[in-house]
Image (spheres, coloured by chain):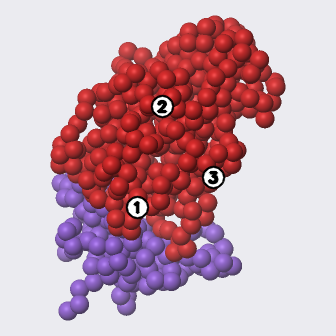
Chain colours: A purple, B red
Amino acid sequence: MGQTIDIAEGLFVDSPIPALVGGRHRDTGQIMFPCPTGNALYEPVTLPSRGTLWSWTVQRYRPKTPPYAGPEEFTPFALGYVELPGAVIVEAPFVDVDFDDLRIGMEMETVLAPLNVDAQGRTIRTFAFAPVRED
Amino acid sequence: MADVFIVGIGIHPFGRTDRLSGLQQGAFAIREALKDAGLEWADMQFGFGGSDSSGNADTMINEMGLTGIPIINVRNGCATGGSSLIGAWQGIASGQFDLGVAFGFDKHPRGAFNAMPSEYSLPDWYGEAGMMVTTQFFAMKLQRYMAHHGISHETLGRVAQKAFDNGVHAPHAWRRSPVDLDTILNSQMISDPLTKYMFCSPAEGGVALILASAKKARELGRADIRIKAAVTRTRPPGSFEVFSPSLSIERGGAPTLLASAAAFEMAGIGPEDIDVAQLQDTESGAEIMHMAENGFCKDGEQEEWLAEGWSRIDGKLPINTDGGCLACGEPIGASGLRQVYENAVQLRGAGGGRQAPGTPRTAYTHVYGAPGISGVTILER
């Protein structure tokens, strides 16, 4: 099992459950994602892990590299916006979802998932949304 | 403001022209417009022009002649053409000039536009994770709109079908053969719900419009097509734009709503008074959404509009009579002026196989693009 690195610092936490870190404007209370860096007006805030699907699409062809850093061998992936209640609507790729099941309003949750393996053999970990499965 | 007339129009066919640079295609369009107006380059007192990726418009003097006139470079994204027109219009309406040219040209590499996060002040991870793709934005804005307003996949196909039908009759269009509805609907899915034939492509081309004061236009025998409004607007809070890692839960308006309202107010007329319209159709769904954002129908009514053919050439409001971006492609700096060119053709009754019947008197154009900018013009005969 090789080392795992995050795609960027300060985007998410993984405990107690995976959740994104947004930025709350100290005066207006408005929340955005990611938290702006080097801007004292924004304070980091952990966002709700679950939300509802706001809109979606499927990326059917491999995006150009650069900037895309996913695997050379491309598999179409779904992505979209999820409304995290009372906070902000965030865009991310989706994992563990059947494209035919996607419906606006369905419940989704924040997960952390591998994007690719870098030149040093390290797994790059990024954030994504997945349908909530009630077990 | 004093009346300003469009007295000459010229276009270099859109598509691919390997032997000419973007600037040279712009020069071709200027020569065509001068010929149309019965004027020479030496008659031009000033110019406003622009391209997004084919260099500075003021170098046009190398192609056209060193007459010493001022040329203002405009670089305003998808509103480049509209902004050039506004500049030229104001130059004449103010009384400073009698004759001038607004022009736009471009030449983009093949394939989808490839954007880098740093060019948009975005973090690198946004592109690394696969979200720096413009087609995703169009698809997601549309997906939500379709779910909320009952727009079907077939209606998206009908928009593209109409575009290719109209392009057949437009000599400046790139795609000039019809494509049947089944082929459009069943072509390769690019970004759900949009298939290959529902997207426009980056292209090449040039457009020029010669503008004149009322006095000059009468001298030329061309005091017929008047600019009633030309505006651009940037985005208001809470709009949904391309390359947005997050959106505010407080949803707001759209730049097109602002531009459209301002243009109608300036012209002193409303959407019901417009006889022909050219609306931004980056993809099929954009035309659908822009029909409502510009006030021509209510959200959801597009389903009936397309089924009944009301936006076809012989419908109650012909939309994108030259096939729009879907049939012409999109050279960014020229695209907005292509719409105005097409409206001038329609108002002159010179559209041939694509002429809107009943001699249209009012014509509307609308562009929309990154990072949330919209431009609208209204012409009257």
Query: Which residue is at 65% across, 45% downward?
Result: B269
Query: Which of the two discs, 3 and 2, sits closer to the camera?
Result: 2
Q: Secondary structure at mark 1?
A: loop
For the residue pair A18 and A125, the one nearer the viewer reads as A18
Q: Is residue B219 visible?
A: yes
For the residue pair B187 and A117, the one nearer the viewer reads as B187
The amino acid at mark 2 is: Gly
Mark 1–mark 2 CB contact (< 8 Å): no
Residue on which disc 1 sits = B300
Tell me if mark 1 has few (under 14), some (14-19) or many (20+) residues whose alpha carbon lies within 10 angstroms of its own: some
Separation (CA) of disc 3 from disc 1: 20 Å
Chain of residue at mark 3 = B
The image shows residue A36, relative to residue B163, as above or below, that is: below
> Looking at the figure, which quarter contains the C terminus of chain B?
top right
Question: Which residue is situated farthest in the front direction here?
Answer: B358
Pinpoint residue B229: horizontal percent, then vertical percent. Answer: 66, 39
Question: Residue B35 falls in which quadrant of the image?
Answer: top right
Number of numbered discs overlaid on the protein picture: 3
Separation (CA) of disc 1 from disc 2: 28 Å
Tell which circle, 3 or 1, labels the residue nearer the N-terminal end.
3
Numbered label attached to residue B261: 3
Pinpoint residue B25: horizontal percent, then vertical percent. Answer: 47, 19
> Looking at the figure, which quarter contains the N terminus of chain B?
top right
Query: Which residue is at 46% across, 51% downward?
Result: B291
Numbered label attached to residue B358: 2
Q: Is residue B162 left or right of residue B229?
A: left
Query: Which residue is at 53% across, 23% downward?
Result: B348
